[in-house]
Structures are given as C-alpha cells and as structure tokens.
Amino acid sequence: MATKAAVLPATAVRRTTPTGDIFARWVVLFFAALVLLITVLLAFELWVGSEPTRHRLGWSFLTSSAWDPVSLKFGAWPFIYGTVVTSVLALLISVPLGLGAAIFLAELAPASISSALTFLIELLAAIPSVIFGLLAIFTLVPLMRSYGEPFLKKTLGFLPFFQGPAFGFGYLTAGLILAVMTFPFIISVSRESLLAVPRDQREAALALGATRWEMTWQVVVPYARLGIVGSIFLGLARALGETMAVTMVIGNDPAVHASLLAPGYSIAAVIANEFTEATGDVYPAALVELGLVLFCLTIIINALARLMIIATTSKGSKRP
Amino acid sequence: MRRSVFALAVCAAASVSVATAQQITAAGATFPAPIYQKWFNDYHNMHGDVQINYQSIGSGAGIQQLTAGTVDFGASDMPMTDQQIAGLKVHPLHFPTVLGAVVPTYNIPGITGDLKFGGETLADIYLGKIKKWNDPALMKDNPGVKLPDDDIVVVHRGDASGTTFIWTDFLSKVSPEWKSKVGANSAVSWPVGLGGKGNEGVSGTVKQTPGSIGYVELFYVIRNKMPYGSVKNSAGTYVKASLESVTAAAAGAAKAMPADFRVSITNAPGKNAYPISSFTWMLIPSKVADANKEKTIKAFLQWMLTDGQKMTEALDYAQLPKEVVAKETKQIAQIQ
C-alpha cells in the first residue's frame, strides 16, 4: 500500500541538520552569549564607574587603610582584610562540619533519616540572610560576648588572635554566622557527590579488607573530590558576597585588627551601608571601585580553585 | 451590548483621569519621614486630588534625585552645600519643616538616673581619649554619681545620615581637636567605635552592650524608652533634650538666621537651648514648570507651616518657632 508520506530519496540518510535543531542551537547559544555579555557589561560598568578614584589614587587604593569621606581619602585594605578573614573563618568552621555531616548523610544514615535531614538542611539554604543577621544580633552576639569570647580569651589569650575587649560584635561572630549560612551548600552538594560514587568502588575497597571508615575516607571521598571542592567554592562565593548578616554583626569599623574579637568591616557591608548617601563624584566612585575589587577577588579565587582541581586530578589519576 | 459596555468603560476611564489631578513626587531624609508621611496622608485626605509621594531614601540620595530631576522636591537633614546648589539647574529654596535633636544614650549597669555630659567630654569620648566611665572629666560632669571602672564602648552610625552630621557638627563646634581631626559630615572617619546601621542599629547595639554610649534621634529614645543624658549648652547649663528645649534652640538662632535658612543651630545661644538640635529642610525648586504643581506645592507649604506644625508634637518632633514660620511664609512667595 503506497503511503501518502513524502518520498525520500534512495539514500535516505539525512545529510543536512533539521531546521528545528539549528533553531534550538542558535537559541541556546544566544542565552549563553547573553550571560557572558551581562558579565562583561558588569565588569565594564564597574571599571567605568570607578574611574575618578582609579585616576586619583591608583594602586595605593588597594594598600591604604584610610577611609575618610570628608577629606576624600579612601583605601580598600581594611575591607579586603575583613572580607577574606570572615570568609576563611567561615570555611574553616563549616568545611569539616559540613563534610562530616555529608558523609554521615550519604554513607551512614538510614535512607529515611537521610532524606528528611537533607530536606531540612536545604530549607536552611533558603532562609534570607537578613533573618540570619537578626538571629545573630539577638542570640549569637550576647552568647559570644558573655560566654564564647571570654572563654577563648582565657584559654587561647596568649595568641594575638584572641586579645582585646570582647564586644560580641567582630570578625569571629561574623565568621560564625557565615559558617551557618554556608553549611547547607556544602552539605547538600557534597552529599550528592558522595552518593554518585559507584557501588563497585565501595565494594572493591571493602573486598580488599578496608574498614568502613577507610573505605569512606580513602576511596569514596577522593572519588567525589571534584564535587566536594565545588561545594566549598560555592560556599565561599556566598561568604564573600554576603552583605546583611555580616554588616549586622561585624561592628562596621574600617580598620585592620589582628584580633578576631575586634570589630572590622567587609566590602559588601560598606557598600550597602554607605552607597545611598554617598554624594559627589569621588565618594561613590570609591565604593564602585570596592565592588570592582570584590569582583576581581572572586575571579582570582575561582581561578585558583580551577587550577587546584587541574593540578590534583592530573596527577596520574585515571578519572577525568 | 458590547458597544455600550465599551462606551461606559471609556467614560469611567475619562472620569478617573480627571479625578487624579496632581501627582507630586519627593524623596530625601529618613529622619522626618514619619511626620512627612502623616502630613502627606492628611493633606491627601483633605484635598482628594493631591497625592504627594515621599520616599525616604536618605538626604544625599534625595539631593541626587533632585539634581537628576526625577523628583519634584527633595528633603535633607543637612543644608545643601554651595557645590550641590551649583549642580542644580533651578535654584532650590530651603524650607525648614521640623526640628530634631540628637541625644547621647548609654547603657551602664548600675546607673539608672540621667547622666550629664559636657561637649568636650563627648568629643573626647568619641576621639578615644576618654576610655573609662570613671574618667575625671565624666566625674566632674556628674558629681555624686558612682561611675564604674568599666571601659566605654563607643557606638556610632555605620551608614551615612543627617543624624551623624548634626552630631559631628556639634562636636566640631565644641572641640577644635575634633574639628581638625575628623570634621563634620554625614559620614566621617571615626577614630574609635562600632558602627550600627540606622538609629535602630545604634540603639540595638547600645542596648545589648554593657558600658556603651551611642547617639540617636530624640524621637527614637522617647518611643523606645531609652535612658539619655543631658548635654552642656553654650550658656553652661546642662539641658536634657525635649520638645521645648529644642524649640528654644531654634528661637535663639532665629535672630541670626540667614535669608536662605541654611544654618546650623547646634550649640545655639540661650539658657534653655538644647545644643544638639537641628532643622530638617524641604528643598523646593524656585521655579516649577507646571503651574498646577506650583499652586499645589505653595498651598501645601502654607498648610504645613500652620496646621501641619500642630501635628508635630504628637509624633515627638519639635515645631518651628513663630519667628522662623513668619520668615518662611514670606519665602513661599519666591516660588514661581
């Protein structure tokens, strides 16, 4: 029975891509290009907007510690220091705890508990940062001032990190609240990576006589290394840019202090606090240049992350 | 049927567009925002066709919007500088609206009464020279009060604001060292202290931190029932901020008031004047393009200077003294 369908030539192999595919490819290419374009525009705007201060201050902006809107002397160093210190502190606390929790949820917990707890932890990621800030002001700060910081001063007071008056506000409290905010990212992404490790890897390790812990720590975690490192950098990205929670507890003091108990400032916090009332030409430009510094800082850290991943995976491991 | 519904809709739309006659936009200072919102609301209830929309985005941002021409008038806690005025196409007229005061609030365990602060004492505390509560300068201001040997935790504003301008303006007048080292502005380089965000941030930090001192707007301490101290004025009396003492400061300064009302009344002369008081201004362009808007703005200003002033005390703002109101009423005529 002859069909009414179109008659294909004898060589019924498609040599040209269907128009639908071409169209789809161009659309998604357009979206990708759009994202790239927005990033480039962002960098361009930051560059142009900071021109008055770049001209005026040059590289000394990065090393100076002055922040005087009256005499127009600006320096980014206290803010860079505060941003880096609070983020590193946050990671130092949340990575071991987060990784440990992820290992528990992926390897040791029964499936029902694991999924329930994961659901709750992912809810934590959805809480707005202002709520964390309020929580920090009303509960964390008094606790730190009355119990946490005096305890640290008594036991570790010989280190320059734990000296000076205990305000409750400062780098340490900001680092703590950032740690709470980066937990959910590290836990959920690491857990996914750990669950994705194939069963035969685990079974091979157990078959060779490894204990449960040896299997987890020496086989599963290295296998999931990429995902775990990715989750850490996701958490770091959140910590670097976090504004409201940090400004509520860091004490907002544009100076560099060695002690973690002292108040400080971060780039995002100063921009949020001062941008609306920054009048004139130079003052807003200084804040825009701080934004440019944060942008570059983020790029540098991500580049280092990439390099680290390349370095560690090309050392004779067969996995890509 | 459809045609008649359509005609009805057109008529309704036309009548609605005739009814919403005047939309006026304004933006600026956060300090007077509560009283402004009340005024604009009540004025709209009285004159249904006038809708004044106010956004409290901050004095500096208000001046920027006025310069950019996106709002009809601005509001600021600081008088505009010559440079800012030069940046505007149309010369702005400053209209003082209400009076505010900034008070020192503190949290000292064991002290329940009111403390007295000399101007220089406050400057030295904020410079970091006075570090403990039982410093001789504080003991001299407060004879007979047992001040503890605790560290003073200084709290200031982390964000820029007119409140900071008023506070630093006063400190610059009473302490030459403050004036040369720090100066007066809505955001300064603080020698010591923690920064809080907004009046709420400073008062929250002070409430939470034993041994701390901070500065907040008067209406804020009244509403939140916080302890605040009295300050020594230029006549040597320790005056506690109140609506009367603030109005006295403005009346004392009224005689020497410049014609454009750009004046700072901190450390004003007068026995009962509270030294850390200030006007807050509405910045009205002297030429309004739309004749309707011009009439509405003039009518509103007239109402604000008469009936509006009666509403200020209920919201804990001090009203303008009569001499200033008289001068302002004459300035309304300058709007064209």
Image: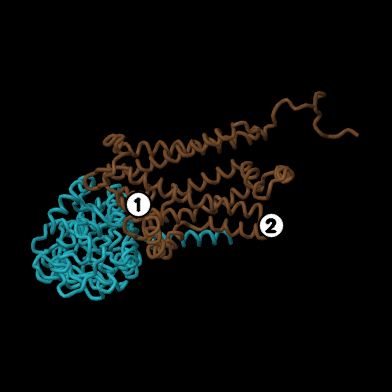
Chain colours: A brown, B cyan
* Residue B114 rendering spot, x and y as whole percentages: 21, 73
Compared to residue B254, the image places residue B74 above or below, namely above
Q: Work out whether residue B39 or residue A181 is closer to the camera in this orientation and state it.
A: A181
Tag 1 residue: A259
For the point 27% across and 36% down, the residue is: A57
Report in which chain the residue with disc 2 lies.
A
- Residue depth check, mark 2 versus mark 1: number of the one nearer the observer: 1
Label 2: which secondary element = helix
Query: What chain does badge 1 belong to?
Result: A
> Front-most of A58 and A81?
A81
- The residue type indicated by label 1 comes to Ser
Residue B73 visible from this viewpoint: no
The numbered mark, 2 or 1, whose residue comes first in the sequence reads 2
Q: Please state if B257 lies on the left or on the right of B165 as rendered.
A: left
> Disc 2 residue type?
Ala
Asked if marks 2 and 1 fall on the same chain, the answer is yes
Q: Which mark is residue A205?
A: none
Residue wearing tag 2? A111
Which quarter of the picture shows residue A263?
A: bottom left
Which image quadrant: the C terminus of chain B?
bottom left
Asked whether residue B83 is in view, the answer is yes
Q: CA distance from mark 2 to mark 1?
A: 44 Å
Secondary structure at badge 1 equals loop
Disc 1 crowd, CA 10 A, few/some/many (<14, 14-19, 20+): some
